[in-house]
Amino acid sequence: MSSNKEISNIPKHVAIIMDGNGRWAQKQGNERVFGHKHGVKSVKNIVEKASELKIEYLTLYAFSTENWNRPKYEVDALMALLVSSINSELDLLNDNNVSLQAIGDIQSLPKDVIDELNSAIKITSKNTGLKLILALSYSARWEILEAVKNIALNVKNSEINIDDIDEELFSSYLTTKQIPDPDLVIRTSGEQRISNFLLWQISYSELYFTEKLWPDFGKDDFLNAIFAFQKRKRRFGKTNDQIENK
C-alpha cells in the first residue's frame, strides 16, 4: 500500500480539521459521543505517523468556539474526554518525543481541562520532536479580532506607530506567532470548507479533502494526503517559470 512509498519533501506543518465523529457514530446506531471516543484512536495514529515522518508541527482542530453551541451533554462529554485523553496519552507523547501546545481562548475552558492541559504542556516541554498543537475553543475570527484589539490598544498607548503595522507585525499578535503557517490542511468527512480555522495562516496552504470520516482516517490515509501534497506546485503568486528557474 502507499505506506511503502519513499517519503520526501515532507510538509513542515500539517493542520487537520478532524470532522465526522458524530456521523460515524450515528451510522453505527450510537450516540455522537461514541464517535468522539473512537476519534481519539485516529489522533494517536496520526501523531505517531507524523512523528515518524519528522513533521515538525501538527495542529489539530479539536474544539471550536462554535462547538460551545452543541447540546450541553455533548460538550460536557467532550470536555471529560479531553481531560482523560490528555492524561492517558502522556506516555505516547513522551515515547514519540512530542511536545504539546495549545491555541485558542484557553481560559474559556473548564478549570480541570486547563489544569490537565497546562500539566501536559509542562511535562512534554523538553521533548524536541513533533510539536502537537491543539486548537481548543478556537476560531480564526476570534483570534483576528483579539489581535486587532491589542494592536489598537498599543497604538493608542503610543507603543507602536500605525505605519509600523504590516503582515509580520500583525502575525506577531496571533496565537500562532511562534508557529509557521501550515503547508497542508487536511479535512476529513467530505465537507469542503474551512470552518473558521486559521484563516490568516492558511492563505497559501495546500488543501486536501477526503471522504473518510475522522474515526476511519488512518496512517495510510495520512500518507495519501502527504503524497497528494508532494504533487502540488506551490507558486505563492509566482509563475511556473519563476519557480522552475529558481
Image (spheres, rainbow, N blue to C red):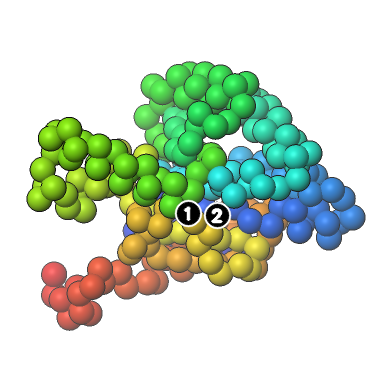
Q: Give the distance between the C-alpha atoms of the residues marked 1 and 2, in whole angstroms.
A: 8 Å
The residue where tag 2 is placed is 17
The residue where tag 1 is placed is 197
228 in relation to 96, above or below: below
Question: Is 16 placed left or right of 155 in the picture?
Answer: right
Residue 110's image quarter?
Answer: top right
Q: Residues within 10 Å of mark 2 (few under 14, many from 20)?
A: many
Mark 1 is on which residue type? Phe
Residue lying farthest to the front in this orientation: 156
Task: Let me know if residue 59 appears in the view.
Answer: yes
82 in relation to 195, above or below: above
114 in relation to 54, above or below: above
Residue found 22% across the figure and 79% down from its top: 240
Residue 150's image quarter?
Answer: top left
18 in relation to 246, above or below: above
Instruction: Say which label, 1 or 2, has the lower sequence index.
Output: 2
Quadrant location of the C terminus in the rendered image: bottom left
Mark 2 is on which residue type? Ile
* Front-lying residue, 152 or 175: 152
- In the rendered image, residue 109, in percent from the top left (x then y), is placed at 58, 31
| Disc 1 + disc 2, Cβ < 8 Å | yes
Circle 2 SS class: strand
